[in-house]
Every structure is written in C-alpha cells, then in structure tokens.
Image: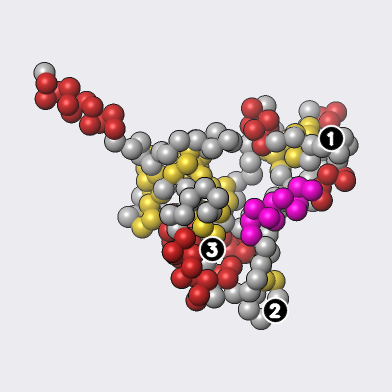
Amino acid sequence: MKIHAIFLAFVMLMPTLASAESSVHIVDGDTLDIDGVRYRLHGIDAPEAGQACAGSDGSNWACGQEAIRQIEELTYGKTVQCDARGQDAYGRTLSVCTADGVEVNARMVETGMAWAFRKYSVDYANLEETAKQQGIGIWQAPTEAAWDFRAHKWDASLTDVPDGKCPIKGNINRKNERIYHVPWSRDYGKTKINVSNGERWFCSEEEALSAGWRAPLWGK
C-alpha cells in the first residue's frame, strides 16, 4: 500500500502532456490547438499574423505569415507534445511544446521567428541574443516588437469603432462560425460587423471567448 501511494503521488506531480500526430491547428506563430485545447507557447512572442517586419534590403516582409509557416513546418505530420504550466488571462494553456522531440519554443526564437518574451520569462534570452547577432529573421533590421505592434494597432483602431472603446470584431461567417478579429489580425480591416445579424463588438479577447467566439485559425 505504501509503494502504491508513492507511485500515485509521483504521477500527480508529473507535468500534463498533450500529444497529437495530425490534429494540430495553427492559431498564429506562438499559439496552437491540439484536440480542442489551445496552447500558448511559454516564454516567446512571435510576430502577429498581419505584421510586417523590416528586411535587410530596406523592404518590408510578411514576418507574421512567415512565423506561421515556420511553426507549420515544425509541427505538421509530427508527434507534438505540450506540457501544462498554468493558464494565461485568455484561458490558454501556457506550454513548452516539442515536435518529434524538437522544442518548438526554442526553435522559433533561435531561427529569428519570435522574440524572447522577457516580460514573463528569460528562458530564451540567450537564444534571442544569438539570433540577433546573426541578423536573421526579425533581427535583419530594427523592427517593431509584437507587443508594441499590438498596442499601436489597438490605439489606432479606437477611432473607427462605435463606442470608441471596444475594437474587437465579433464576426459570424458563412458557416455560422463565430470568429473574433483583434485590431492586429490579418483580416481585421476587411471584416465588417452587422449587429442586426448577431455580430458584435468586444472590449477584450476574454469577453469574446466567454461569449462563444474564437480566434481565426491559420495554416493547414
């Protein structure tokens, strides 16, 4: 009985893992869904889907879409495992994920496709410094970090919303799916809201999620 109790205690202390070979859906460069559970990659912040970054040749490139392509290449057709490190304010599970044994969080930073999110963790700070020295990905030229990009997009959108306070668009598509678009979303500008059809505006992502809307999914 004593050995059994020790075994149960060990199991309860083990990190929770989710794994999948084919049910991975990409939300953006640092968020993915596995079997209906949304995982936010711990310690990193990737460019937003609609974000452009400065290139070494002076032109802009679609770093947000490239980050999505990168995480697709890392995960699709692979066995993906994600641990559980609590939840963020949006109800997403904070996690370190691996794909066939390769850590996704670390690979996104070391290839220059995500920033180390030092506000919350310095786990990937050294990898970020190396990528910065190499001038790869988002480090080709000075560019706006994802958190600043989100803040600026939010502030700019407030001038065009009905109440001047709640800029998140709660759209209902042709499949009757309820999808919300934040101001930094790729499709935000072309999304129209018709409140007579049940569409609405939200003040926060938490509010949209609680009302039954979801974020758009990218990738395959």
Q: Amino acid at mark 1?
A: Asn
Could you tell me which residue is drawn at 53 percent across and 53 percent down? 117
Q: Amino acid at mark 2?
A: Gly
* Contact flag, marks 1 and 2 (Cβ < 8 Å): no
Does residue 155 appear anywhere in the picture?
yes
Residue 96, position as x, y percentages in the image: 41, 48
- Can you say whether 41 is above or below 64 in the image? above
Q: Describe residue 144's horizontal placement relative to residue 27 as left or right.
A: right
- Can you say whether 185 is above or below 203 in the image? below
Q: Secondary structure at mark 2?
A: loop
Q: Amino acid at mark 3?
A: Met
Q: Which residue is mark 2?
A: 58
Q: In front: mark 1 or mark 3?
A: 3
- Can you say whether 88 is above or below 122 in the image? above
Task: Specify the label residue 113 is tagged with.
Answer: 3
Precedes in sequence: disc 1 or disc 2: 2
Classed neighbour count for the residue bearing mark 2: other residues with Cα under 10 Å, few (<14), some (14–19), many (≥20): few
Q: Which residue is mark 1?
A: 194
Could you tell me which residue is drawn at 70 percent across and 56 percent down? 149
Does residue 68 appear anywhere in the picture?
no
Q: Describe residue 14's horizontal placement relative to residue 142 as left or right.
A: left
Residue 167, position as x, y percentages in the image: 79, 40
**Chain part drawn in magenta:** 145-155
